[in-house]
């Protein structure tokens, strides 16, 4: 209920409510409506690459929403980086 794993969304596809949007895409930009969301964060990772375990752990802690908030995390196609 609190985690949404997705592909890159169009602005009208953004589910409500979402507290944090974590964009892992490095080759595309999210629509401006999504980038202006107060909880939007971009942590670009190149396609077909990954993070070290330490970096992944740090990223997971940095994107965690406050108390039962909803997190939407995405890359370009919704698999691989996500």
Image (spheres, helix red, strand yellow):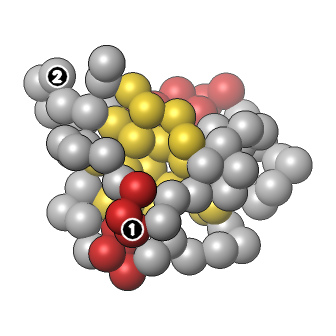
Residues at discs 1 and 2 in contact (Cβ within 8 Å): no
Question: Gap in Å between the C-alphas at discs 1 and 2?
Answer: 23 Å
Residue 44, quarter of picture:
bottom right
For mark 1, give the secondary structure: helix
The answer to whether any part of residue 82 appears in the image is: yes
Residue 30 is tagged as: none
Ranked by sequence position, the earlier of labels 1 and 2 is: 1
Percent position of residue 31, x then y: 45, 76
Q: How crowded is mark 2: few (under 14 residues within 10 Å), some or many (20 or more)?
A: few
For mark 2, give the secondary structure: loop
Percent position of residue 72, x then y: 40, 41
Residue in the image at 77% along x and 39% along y:
80
| Outermost residue toward the right in this view | 48
**How many callouts does the rendering have?**
2
Percent position of residue 43, x then y: 53, 57
Residue 68 is tagged as: 2
Residue 46, quarter of picture:
bottom right
82 vs 6, nearest the viewer: 6
Q: In this view, does 81 lie to the left or right of 30?
A: right
Image quarter of the N terminus: top left
Q: Mark 1 points at which residue?
A: 11
Q: In this view, does 13 lie to the left or right of 78?
A: left
Image quarter of the C terminus: top right
Residue in the image at 52% along x and 34% along y:
5
| Outermost residue toward the left in this view | 67
Percent position of residue 10, x then y: 48, 66
Above/below status of 4 relative to 29: above
| Outermost residue toward the front in this view | 12
Give the label, 1 or 2, closer to the camera: 1
């Amino acid at each position: 209920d609190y985690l949404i794993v997705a592909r890159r969304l169009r602005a009208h596809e953004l589910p409500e409510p979402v507290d944090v949007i974590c964009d892992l895409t490095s080759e595309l930009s999210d629509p401006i409506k999504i980038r202006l969301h107060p909880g939007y964060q971009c942590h670009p990772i190149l396609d077909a690459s990954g993070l070290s375990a330490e970096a992944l752990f740090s990223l997971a802690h940095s994107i965690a929403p406050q108390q039962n908030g909803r997190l939407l995390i995405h890359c370009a196609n919704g698999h691989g980086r996500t």
